[in-house]
Amino acid sequence: MAQIRERTVLFADLRGSTAIFESLGNAEATALVTQTVSLIGQAVGECHGHLIKTLGDGLMAVFDSPRDGVRSAVRMHELLERVVARGKLQGGSPSLRALRMQVALARGEVVEMNGDCFGDAVNVAARLLDHAGDNETLITAEVLLGLPGMQKAKFRSLDRIAVRGRSEPVHVHVLDQPAQSGDMAATQFGEVVHAVEPDGIRLQWMELDRVFDIDNMPIVLGRSVQATYCITDGRVSRSHARIDWHGGSFSVTDLSYNGTFVRFGLDGEIVSLKRGSCTLHGSGVIGLGSPPIDASSPVVRFEVLHFADTEPQTMGSLRCRL
């Protein structure tokens, strides 16, 4: 018999499992991925949730309260970190040490029938995974509304994001991860100094030349017509990358399977992002799906702007269209 109830729906998905199959073979990889999914699934019961089903390298669960759902997501990340750390200590394969996870939660009425759940909240939570970066937890505004103040303070808004299958954008929030040994951009890509916070960012791909200010964040770059910045190239994923404003700077996060590549300046080193992020500064190019070394590749030029200091430098013969 079908029942309609208000539920917080959680989807979790492991990233990097394909590489494990390639390096370990089907039998060993299947056992490892199954064990890992089973381990992170323990967080559901620990936080008073109900595991609906496992999905190969992921799972779906429901919770009565948003608080328990978010607690479960945090616990899942902790459990996966233990698996990865243990793999490093024991000399596990590089693919095991590269495992990452995305979690997404939505809340609303769901139809519970024959041990499964259906409804808009289920669809939204599942599709939010497309917009999550490595080890990120995304939640909808409905989930945030049900959290106590201490938990709410740990999230920041990504504003409204177009979600596949939804006519209206969804207001999404991301769980801030604690900073590790300094700014990621400073440790990986050289020291980045922000004497004055930027005012906007300019993006140019072919004739699509636009400027976005910080109130327009986030910007989703992708092939989907619902993407903020639509790039109609078959090598680009529907939601390929996301540009955020946080902590006084712009950052780009890869959301794709083929990767995102950033090169600063005219001939700087190419930074490869595989479900990772980096801070954007100055100017350069973003390669979507392939490194920006082939003239035919889908490449977006970017320029971080300081309106008060100077006029943006030209990046071509086209005039900027706001």
Image (cartoon, rainbow, N blue to C red):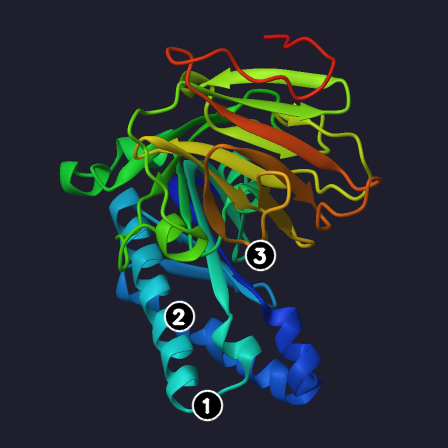
**Mark carried by residue 91:** 1
**Mark carried by residue 80:** 2
Identified by mark 3, the residue type is Lys
- Residue 273, compared with residue 94, is above or below; it is above
Provide the residue designation for mark 3.
274
**Mark carried by residue 38:** none
* Residue at the image point whose x is 63% and y is 39% from the top: 266
Image check: 257 left or right of 59? right
The answer, for residue 304, to whether it is visible in the render is yes
Earlier sequence position, callout 3 versus callout 2: 2
Image check: 197 left or right of 62? left
- Residue 193, compared with residue 53, is above or below; it is above
What is the CA distance from the residue labelled 2 to the residue labelled 1? Answer: 16 Å
Image check: 50 left or right of 146? right
Identified by mark 2, the residue type is Leu
Earlier sequence position, callout 2 versus callout 1: 2
Identified by mark 1, the residue type is Gly
Task: Tell me whether the residue at label 3 lies in contact with that at label 2, contact meaning CB atoms closer than 8 angstroms.
Answer: no
Task: Judge the density around disc 2: few (<14), some (14-19), many (≥20) Cα neighbours within 10 Å.
Answer: many
Q: Nearer the viewer, mark 2 or mark 1?
A: 1
Location of residue 63 in the rendering, given as x and y in whole percent from the top left corner: 35, 50
Which is more toward the observer, 59 or 27? 27
- Residue 187, compared with residue 172, is above or below; it is below
Location of residue 235 in the rendering, given as x and y in whole percent from the top left corner: 79, 44
In terms of secondary structure, where does tag 2 sit? helix
Location of residue 23 in the rendering, given as x and y in whole percent from the top left corner: 66, 83
Q: Quadrant of residue 301?
A: top right
Earlier sequence position, callout 3 versus callout 1: 1
Q: Quadrant of residue 251?
A: top left
* Residue at the image point whose x is 48% and y is 28% from the top: 218
What is the CA distance from the residue labelled 3 to the residue labelled 2? Answer: 18 Å
Task: Judge the density around disc 3: few (<14), some (14-19), many (≥20) Cα neighbours within 10 Å.
Answer: some
